[in-house]
């Protein structure tokens, strides 16, 4: 089983300090929700967000959406070899059931996430498909069986993908961490046994997720 963590993801509800800003209240009213029950989204809340700490690394739920969609619909997941977690910028951890049928539509995804932040689970009753609780990347790592923690970063050691991943699956139970933010670096690499790069320039998180999963699928003989 491979564990993947989308780390420090730019996924959160609107923080109280900007809940009264017109760009926030307008969208919330349209949805029939309180501002704090809606997701922070830089495409809509740019004017309000500019006063927030680290605003350039926040308000991008689409990164988590696209990365999850890719990871969960792949052969690696369909073969029961993947467990995905999302760790958010405000230290929430989302457990995602491998069998979840991810919405292909972004607006529907946002609705699901707003429900998750509001009631702590999706769906509200019955067998959970997503669960939300407070936690850090360390909590996720401590909670899963693993032998090696690998952070993906463009500043890491450039590896030969084919060779690296075939050796990895032979010897280790890996946890792979991909940044779920749009700019900058992880704030903390202390948990990493290794930092690796898949390409010499920065890529979008979902592309990295896709490259890594593809290599794992080949290394495991799934495709
Ligand atoms: C959009 S990047 C983060 C921002 C990027 N560091 C920048 O300043 O443009 C999202 C994540 O994808 C992963 N990533 C991006 N490029 C990578 C590369 N060349 N090799 C390995 N991982 C990469 C990292 O985990 C990174 O945190």
Image (cartoon, rainbow, N blue to C red):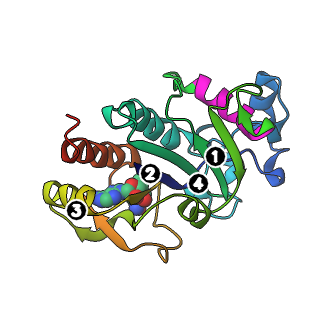
Q: Nearer the viewer, mark 2 or mark 1?
A: 2
Image quadrant in which you'd find residue 61? top right
| Among the two numbered marks 2 and 1 on one chain, the one whose residue lies closer to the N terminus | 2
| Among the two numbered marks 3 and 2 on one chain, the one whose residue lies closer to the N terminus | 2
**Residue range corresponding to the magenta coloring:** 107-118
The secondary structure type at the circle numbered 3 is loop
**Number of the label disc, if any, that sits on residue 46:** 1
Q: Nearer the viewer, mark 2 or mark 4?
A: 2
* Residue for badge 4: 87
Measure the C-alpha gap from mark 3 to mark 2: 22 Å
| Among the two numbered marks 2 and 4 on one chain, the one whose residue lies closer to the N terminus | 2
- Give the residue drawn at x 82%, y 54%: 17
- Image quadrant, ligand 1: bottom left
The secondary structure type at the circle numbered 2 is strand
Measure the C-alpha gap from mark 1 to mark 3: 30 Å
Measure the C-alpha gap from mark 2 to mark 4: 10 Å
* Contact flag, marks 2 and 1 (Cβ < 8 Å): no
Q: Nearer the viewer, mark 3 or mark 2?
A: 2
Question: In the figure, 110 relative to 211: above or below?
Answer: above
Assess disc 1: are there few (<14), some (14-19) or many (≥20) residues with their C-alpha within 10 Å of its C-alpha: some
Left or right: 135 as drawn, with respect to 30: left
* Residue for badge 2: 4
* Residue for badge 3: 200
Note whether ligand 1 is within 8 Å of mark 2. Answer: no
* Contact flag, marks 3 and 2 (Cβ < 8 Å): no
- Give the residue drawn at x 15%, y 61%: 160
Note whether ligand 1 is within 8 Å of mark 3. Answer: yes
Task: Give how far across and how far down residue 117 sits, in percent.
Answer: 74, 40
Residue 60 versus residue 77: which sits nearer the camera?
A: 77
| Among the two numbered marks 4 and 3 on one chain, the one whose residue lies closer to the N terminus | 4
* Contact flag, marks 1 and 3 (Cβ < 8 Å): no
């Amino acid at each position: 089983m491979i564990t993947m963590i989308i780390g420090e993801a730019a996924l959160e509800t609107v923080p109280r300090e900007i809940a009264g800003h017109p760009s926030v209240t307008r969208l919330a009213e349209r949805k029939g929700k309180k501002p704090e029950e809606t997701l922070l989204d830089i495409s809509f809340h740019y004017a309000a967000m500019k006063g927030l700490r680290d605003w350039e690394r926040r308000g991008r739920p689409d990164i988590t959406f696209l990365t999850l969609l890719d990871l969960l619909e792949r052969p690696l997941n369909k073969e029961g070899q993947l467990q995905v977690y999302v760790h958010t910028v405000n230290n929430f951890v989302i457990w995602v059931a491998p069998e979840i049928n991810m919405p292909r539509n972004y607006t529907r995804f946002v609705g699901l996430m707003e429900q998750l932040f509001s009631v702590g689970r999706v769906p509200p009753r019955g067998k959970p498909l997503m669960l939300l609780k407070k936690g850090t990347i360390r909590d996720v790592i401590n909670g899963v069986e693993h032998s090696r923690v690998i952070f993906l970063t463009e500043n890491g050691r450039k590896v030969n993908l084919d060779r690296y991943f075939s050796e990895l699956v032979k010897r280790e139970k890996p946890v792979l961490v991909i940044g779920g933010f749009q700019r900058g670096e992880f704030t903390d690499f202390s948990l990493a046994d290794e930092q690796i790069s898949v390409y010499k320039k920065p890529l979008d998180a979902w592309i990295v997720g896709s490259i890594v999963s593809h290599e794992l699928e080949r290394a495991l003989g799934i495709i």
